Structure formats: structure tokens, C-alpha cells
Image (tube, grey):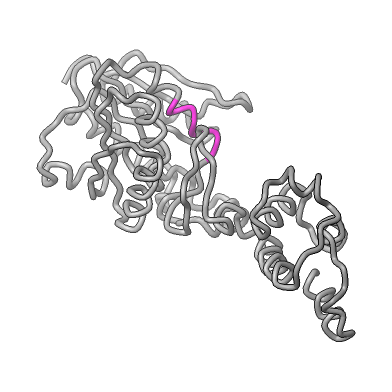
Amino acid sequence: MLYLWLFHIHLQKMAESLITIKQALKLTLTNSKIQRLEANILLAHVINQSKEYLITHDNEILTMQQILEYNKLCEKAEQDYPIAYILGNQEFYGLEFKVTENVLIPRQDTELLVDFAIKHAPINASILDMGTGSGAIAVALKYNRQDINMYACDISQNALDIAKINAENNKVKINFLYSDWFDNLLNENTNIKFDMIITNPPYIHKDDRHLTQEIRFEPRIALTDEKDGLKHIRNIIQNAKNFLNLESYLAIEHGYNQSEDVQDIFLEHGYSNIEHIIDLGGYVRVTYARITAL
């Protein structure tokens, strides 16, 4: 680990030693499980420069303060603490988003929902993003479709606070609502019906190994329903028709192996024109349908 190296430097009173960017990165790759890209991202963050800067200035001397800060971040990364949480931000749909442990880290698969909504939303549509978290979906959609009236709800006030910051930072106007799915919407002084509802709900099975491994630092309430992963999806599909106009869409992101179950739930509640969207890995990750009768 890096801290052993730093301790060695300290013992030998080598604070004046010339430690370069290149040497620090080499030490990281040699003595830790951190990958090259992660090491570059962390060190670039510490010295407030781009990753490209590390290449063109690899002989630049690091200060002891920079070394200590870099070491601190590497120790977190060694414990699989997400890089996005370490940096406090994550890119999504070409935009920058503030993220903390109160929200999920936006992922590329979820961009499929934004693609769908941009393409299928009518002009001046009213759209609801349910379980907005960091606001990534709502902000990216509104940023690319300025004509729409964007609404976003979440059960976590902490998440809504982050989402509001992201909307402000990306200069978009969104109507944020505090609600446990549909429960509080009628109490938020909005009797509006939507032309589209999109959502990335908690869909991971309670026994999925990922919950105790690589995603263990993310908010569990946003990952799993503590059951089979379909509880919230059933709730949303069953109740969405009360908040949708005729011929409107409901689009749901779900697990790679849940498409048949989600389709069956749509059929059970009278939806039609059910379609799927496949991710880059070849898995169905979004299923959507239309309301043709209320």
C-alpha cells in the first residue's frame, strides 16, 4: 500500500525527495489493486488537472500535501469505495452530476431511458421521472428537450436536495416533488396527468450478491425492494394509469433477467404495445408500454 511507502519516506526524513507524477502512478499500480484509469483519475483530481496533463507532465514533482491526499483517496479506492463518491461527481449523458452516498451513481444503461423519452415525448409533453435520485434522468431529458414540462419525485429528501443542485448546475427547470411513488402526488398541488412516466426503480433481488460487493456503498433503498426486485415495478405499473393520459407511455428500467416478468405485469394491468430496449451487452434493460384504455 502507498501509506507504507509514505511512512518509509517519513522515517528517512525524505520530505524533500523528488517524487514525480510518473513515479506516484507506477507505485500505485505496483502496490495496489487500483487500475491505471482509476489511478489517473484520482491523481488528476488531487492536482486539479486533466488526465492528459499527467501524460504531458509526468516528470512534474508532487508536493508532500498532494502525495498525502492522493494516498488517502487511493486507500478508499482500495476498499472498493466508488470513484464517483470520492470525486463527488459523475458524468451522465454528457452532463456533470453531483453525487453523494444519498443517491445512486448514474450509469450508462440508464441513458436508454433518456434516449427513449427524447424520441417519443410529444411536443410540450408533461413527463414524470419517478425515484429521481440525483436527478440524472430528469435533468438530461429536460436539457435535451427544452419544450417539455419536467416533473421528478423521490421518497428521499436528501436525494431531492442533490437533484435540485444538479438541475441548477445544468441550468434546467424541473418541478421536484416529495413522494413515495404515487402516494403524495395528489397532495403536492398537482392534479396534472402526464404524457409519459419514466423510472429506474429499485429492482435488485434482496439476495443478489452485488448488494454486498461492488454496490454496497450505494443507498440500499434505491437498489432493492428487499424482496424479489419486482415489488416497486408492480406498484408503478398498477397505479401509473391513474396519472397518465390516453396513448401515453410508461417506460421502466429493470434487471437484465426481468423483461418477461415486467412484460407479464404490463399485460396483467391492461397495457398494450409493449416493447423492449436492448443495452450494449445485448440484454433487455428497458420495457415500455402505452395506455390505450383507463
The secondary structure that dominates the magenta segment is: helix
Q: Which residues are magenta?
A: 107-114
| Quadrant of residue 132 within the rendered picture | top left
Query: Is residue 213 left or right of 124 when viewed as pictured?
Result: right
Question: Residue 182, position in %: x, y?
Answer: 22, 42
Query: Is residue 92 left or right of 39 when viewed as pictured?
Result: left
Question: Residue 211, position in %: x, y?
Answer: 55, 54
Residue 203 lies, with reference to residue 270, above or below; the image says below
**At 10% from the left edge and 42% from the top edge, which residue is drawn?**
189
| Quadrant of residue 265 within the rendered picture | top left
In the image, 231 versus 282, the foreground residue is 282
**At 83% from the left edge and 52% from the top edge, which residue is drawn?**
58
In the image, 189 versus 27, the foreground residue is 27
Quarter of the figure that contains the C terminus? top left
Quarter of the figure that contains the N terminus? bottom right
Membership of 113 in magenta stretch: yes
